[in-house]
Image (cartoon, rainbow, N blue to C red):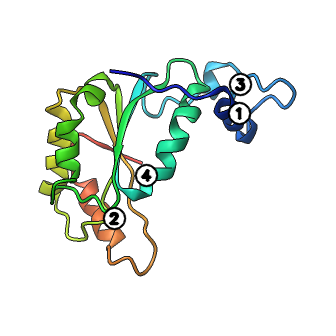
Amino acid sequence: MSSWAATEAQRKDVMRNSPLHDEDLLEGCFSGTEETQSTAVGSPGEVFLLGDSLSFGVKDFLPAALSVTEGWSMSGSDTVSSRTLNRGENSGTNAAAASKDGLSAAKHVVVMLGTNQSDASKEDIGEVVKAIKDAPSSASISWVSVNTGDGSGVDDEAFNTTLSGVSGINII
């Protein structure tokens, strides 16, 4: 199993674009005090990203973003275009089952799925959560709510309402 690390150029780019960076020294993205550090998802650790094509940009940016804060890194990712929750060979459920090493190492799992399955049920979402936990993984699971805009064929509000009824996940 390998962890990802950002290059120095990526690290500097993240720091340069952070609203809290030190303009002269590019030394950090926070003031160094506990009060300014986010605790929304818990303590630092490895992160695994599971998603569809909307997560492609995040997958490339996340290692660099995590590397600027001590203790955060990537344990891996599995992102595929047109991925559904539990339909087909490249489904989220199958991807979680095939990503045991990365999921087992992760302290946090970020899921970006839902844009390709407009009729997803609470059970469909639950199957993905179960596959993550069966890795085995005791990671916290944060699921990004869907906001596709008009014309995608996905009812964002209906999916997000269904998502809010699933226990064991944080919705971001």
Assess disc 1: are there few (<14), some (14-19) or many (≥20) residues with their C-alpha within 10 Å of its C-alpha: many
* Residue under label 1: 15
Residue type at numbered disc 1? Met
Residue type at numbered disc 2? Thr
Assess disc 4: are there few (<14), some (14-19) or many (≥20) residues with their C-alpha within 10 Å of its C-alpha: many
Return the x and y of residue 33 as percentages of the image width and height: 67, 19
Residue depicted at 56% across the width and 18% down the height? 70
Q: CA distance from mark 4 to mark 1?
A: 21 Å
Residue type at numbered disc 4? Ser
Q: CA distance from mark 1 to mark 3?
A: 6 Å
Secondary-structure class at tag 3? loop
Q: Which mark is residue 55?
A: 4
Secondary-structure class at tag 2? loop
Quarter of the image holding residue 104?
top left
Quarter of the image holding residue 162?
bottom left
For marks 2 and 1 on the same chain, the one whose residue lies earlier in the sequence: 1
For marks 3 and 2 on the same chain, the one whose residue lies earlier in the sequence: 3
Q: CA distance from mark 3 to mark 4?
A: 25 Å
Residue depicted at 35% across the width and 59% down the height? 81
Q: CA distance from mark 3 to mark 2?
A: 35 Å
* Residue under label 2: 115
For marks 1 and 3 on the same chain, the one whose residue lies earlier in the sequence: 1
* Residue under label 3: 28
